[in-house]
Image: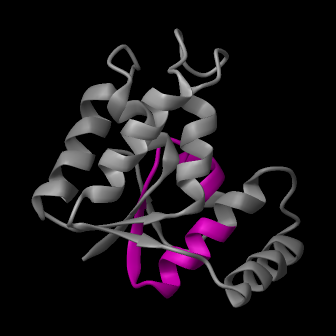
């Protein structure tokens, strides 16, 4: 069973005062231990870097060096597969977004879901259930 781990989970797992820290940390730790096969889309690391170093998303924000350490730690987890979307993933995400009338940044959620589907994921772990549910591409869970 492969599950996409969304940026919102990765973010909450490292921010101890985040309201969903405990559940997010447990979800990431379960993947790290091999309880399930986790998938992270490489684009999520860019988003994570941005959110960890942004004072509007993380108070206090992490330094770029600290954010990079967090990302490198995730990257080193043996039971979490890092997936890079290909051109077909991008175009399929655009097609779905156009057909569904997706606007704004939900298109990026569409891309990571498409890439995860193509990598064999059957569900997604996220704190943004509402945005992912709009796309109706796979089972979406909040840990």
Instruction: Residue 20: tell me if it is visible.
Output: no
Residue 113 magenta: yes
Instruction: Residue 132: tell me if it is visible.
Output: yes
Looking at the image, which residue is at 41% across and 31% down?
Answer: 12
Residue 130 magenta: yes
- 48 w.r.t. 58: above or below: below
What sort of colour scheme is used for the picture? one colour
- 69 w.r.t. 73: above or below: above
Query: Horizontal and vertical percent for residue 85?
Result: 61, 77
Query: Horizontal and vertical percent for residue 107?
Result: 77, 61
- Quadrant of the frame with the C terminus: top left
- 29 w.r.t. 91: above or below: above
Depth check: 124 or 65 in front?
Answer: 65
Looking at the image, which residue is at 30% across and 46% down?
Answer: 73
Query: Horizontal and vertical percent for residue 77?
Result: 24, 58
Looking at the image, which residue is at 53% across and 48% down?
Answer: 129
Quarter of the image where one finds residue 99: bottom right
Left or right? Give the position of 85 relative to 123: right
Query: Horizontal and vertical percent for residue 59?
Result: 53, 10
Left or right? Give the position of 2 relative to 58: left
Identify the residue at the far top of this view.
60
- Quadrant of the frame with the N terminus: bottom left
Stretch of the chain drawn in magenta: 111-132
Looking at the image, which residue is at 50% across and 21% down?
Answer: 62
Identify the residue at the far front of this view.
65
Left or right? Give the position of 53 relative to 25: right
């Amino acid at each position: 069973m492969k599950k996409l781990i969304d940026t919102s989970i990765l973010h909450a797992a490292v921010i101890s005062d985040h309201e969903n820290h405990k559940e997010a940390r447990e979800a990431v730790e379960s993947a790290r231990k091999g309880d399930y096969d986790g998938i992270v889309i490489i684009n999520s690391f860019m988003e994570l870097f941005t959110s960890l170093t942004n004072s509007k998303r993380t108070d206090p924000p992490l330094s770029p060096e600290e954010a990079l350490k967090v990302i490198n730690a995730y990257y080193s987890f043996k039971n979490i597969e890092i997936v890079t979307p290909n051109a077909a993933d991008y175009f399929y995400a655009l097609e779905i977004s156009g057909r569904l009338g997706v606007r704004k940044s939900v298109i990026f959620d569409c891309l990571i879901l498409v890439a995860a589907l193509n990598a064999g994921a059957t569900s997604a772990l996220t704190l943004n259930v509402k945005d992912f549910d709009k796309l109706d591409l796979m089972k979406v869970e909040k840990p």
